[in-house]
Image: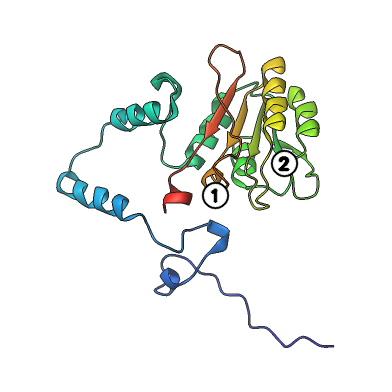
Amino acid sequence: MSAPARPAAQTYNTSMPSADSLVRLHLSESPFGASPAAVAAVTGELDRINRYPAPEREELVQRLSRHWEVPQEQIAVANGSDELVLATALTLGDLDRPGLVTAGTFPGYLAALERIGRGAVHVPLDGPRVDPAAFAERLPECGIGYVCNPHNPCGTALPGPALDTLTAAARDSSTPLVFDEAYHEFGPPEQPRAKIRPGDGAPVLVLRTFSKAYG
């Protein structure tokens, strides 16, 4: 059997007129467009676009605090998860130790760690899933860990006991652990999520984003 010749791959980007008609799966963009409520809110802000926004994003932090029942001082807002990934890589844990990531996951963690010279240790996946026991075992030797849950791109999610195992490893080793839950809204309502428990001593951070589920 012989495959027909394929044309050279074409690179698409937002500067091309045809980009809006494409479903760019590698960027996980919503094919349905932004929420009408989000569009209305943005449009309503155009009258004061000549002013800088509040640098502390107080109103957004207050609303997130009420929604998640988390103290305001435990919430940080940034221009996308990538900014928070880089900020955590720059500031948290033993900066002389590499970060810990899983193989075949979102490349932003590795990019941030490599860019600042920390480097990274890779834990193999267990099939399409994160191996919580293997990750927990390696965490104490690293300076910080990143777990994408649900996993990008496999789509698998960790059960509650696995999240507890990873949180305990962070607490026992004092190694910061970042759970990236960018795709949590794509799972069922009962899907377990990482929880920040004030006072338990676990250095855990949880990332969420408006861009995936809300376009």
Few, some or many C-alpha atoms within 10 Å of disc 2 (few <14, some 14-19, many ≥20)?
many
* Residue 144 percent location from the top left of the image: 65, 27
Which quarter of the figure is the C terminus placed in? bottom left
Q: Quadrant of residue 147?
A: top right
Q: Which mark is residue 102?
A: 2
Residue 74 got which mark? none
What is the C-alpha distance between the residues marked 1 and 2? 21 Å
Q: Position of residue 29 (x, y in %)?
A: 48, 58
Which residue occupies the extreme front position in the image? 190
136 w.r.t. 73: above or below:
below
Of the pair 4 and 167, the residue shown nearer to us: 167
**Residue at horizontal 63 percent and vertical 49 percent from the top:** 152
- The amino acid beneath tag 2 is Thr
Q: Give percent across and percent down for residue 172.
A: 71, 15
Name the image quarter holding residue 96: top right
The structure residue drawn at horizontal position 72% and vertical position 41%, both measured from the top left corner, is: 102
Question: Mark 2: which secondary structure?
Answer: strand
Relative to 37, say whether 3 is above or below. below
Query: Residue at the spot x=31%, y=56% of the render?
Result: 36
On screen, residue 10 versus residue 101, left or right, reads left
* Viewer can see residue 97: no
Q: From the image, tell me which residue sits under label 1.
A: 186
Horizontally, residue 55 falls left or right of residue 1, namely: left
- Note whether 100 is above or below 153 in the view shown: above
**Looking at the rendering, which quadrant does residue 130 occupy?**
top right
Q: At 46% across and 64% down in the image, what residue appears?
A: 31
Q: From this viewpoint, is residue 180 visible?
A: yes
